[in-house]
Each structure stands twice: as structure tokens, then as C-alpha cells.
Image (cartoon, rainbow, N blue to C red):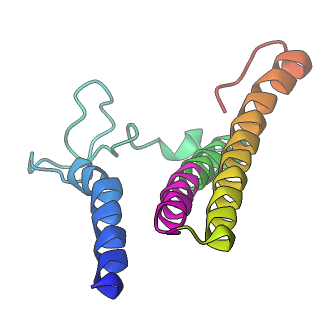
Amino acid sequence: MKKVILPILVITMLMVVMGPNLAMALDTTGGTPTNNSTTGAGGNLPAGSIPAAGSLDIWTILKKVLDWFFNIVIIIGALYIVYAGWIYITAGGDDEKAKKGLSGLVQALIGIGIALLAKGLIYVVSEFVIGKGTTF
């Protein structure tokens, strides 16, 4: 029974995390791809409209990559918190497993904290360098 619980937990977490993203990517309008960001239909991406070819520059691409990376780090951190909590809860009086669970929880929280500080640091540095904070 114990061997069945972890795969079910992982599959459930993946469905919770990825399910809304898959549903948002579905275009049910049947329209052609457009660049109309006000309607949100007709080929637009879930995170915004499809950018025009001339508006793509290195900073736009870098921003998109960093946003994706940040989101992935936060998701992995949340999954690691769940895993560490599971280890801690199922320790059953075993001090080694309890220490391992608490250590994993601290590591996950430190990782999420570093990711949040890095995202904030980009804003602060851009405020000083170019005079306005970027929404990296």
C-alpha cells in the first residue's frame, strides 16, 4: 500500500499544477491567430498576445525565459515542501527521518526565498540603472 501512495500523490500534484495550464492553452473560438490582446481569443497565448515579429528583442526573450524559470523554481519548491512534509509526517518516531524531513523543508524554503530575492533584486537594480523598475 505504501508503494502506491507516492505515485498517486505525484500524479495528483501534476494534475493540480498542470491542469489549469492545459485548459488555458485550449483555443475553443475556432478563429485564426490574431494579435488582439483585448479579447484573449483567436490564437493568443495564455500569458498574453502573440508578439509581432518586429517587437522581439533579446530583452523580451530574456524576460520570458526568466519568468518561466522562476515559475518552475516555485513549483519545484512547493513540491519539495510537500515531499519533505511527507517524510517528516511518516517518520514514525525515527529521529533520522524526522531530521531529513525538517532539513528538506528548510532547504525548500531557502530555495524559494532565494528565488524571490533574485526576482526582487532584478527590479531594484533596474530601478537604479535605467531609472524605472522593470517587471522582470
Q: Quadrant of residue 29?
A: top left
Residue 43 at what x, y percent from top left?
25, 48
Q: Quadrant of residue 50?
A: top left
Q: Is residue 98 left or right of residue 131?
A: left
Residue 73 at what x, y percent from top left?
61, 54
Residue 102 at what x, y percent from top left?
66, 56
* Residue at x 54%, y 61% (from the top left corner): 88
Q: Which residues are magenta?
A: 74-92
Q: Is residue 124 left or right of residue 64?
A: right
Residue 17 at what x, y percent from top left?
35, 55
Position above or below: 91 against 25: below
Q: Quadrant of residue 95?
A: bottom right
Q: Is residue 109 left or right of residue 41?
A: right
* Residue at x 76%, y 43% (from the top left corner): 114
Q: Main secondary structure of the magenta part?
A: helix
* Residue at x 33%, y 69% (from the top left corner): 9
* Residue 103 belongs to magenta span: no
Q: Is residue 128 left or right of residue 119?
A: right
Q: Nearer the viewer, residue 116 or 54?
A: 116
* Residue 86 belongs to magenta span: yes
* Residue at x 39%, y 37% (from the top left corner): 48
Q: Quadrant of the N terminus?
A: bottom left
Position above or below: 121 against 43: above
Q: Nearer the viewer, residue 69 or 43?
A: 69
Q: Nearer the viewer, residue 73 or 135?
A: 73
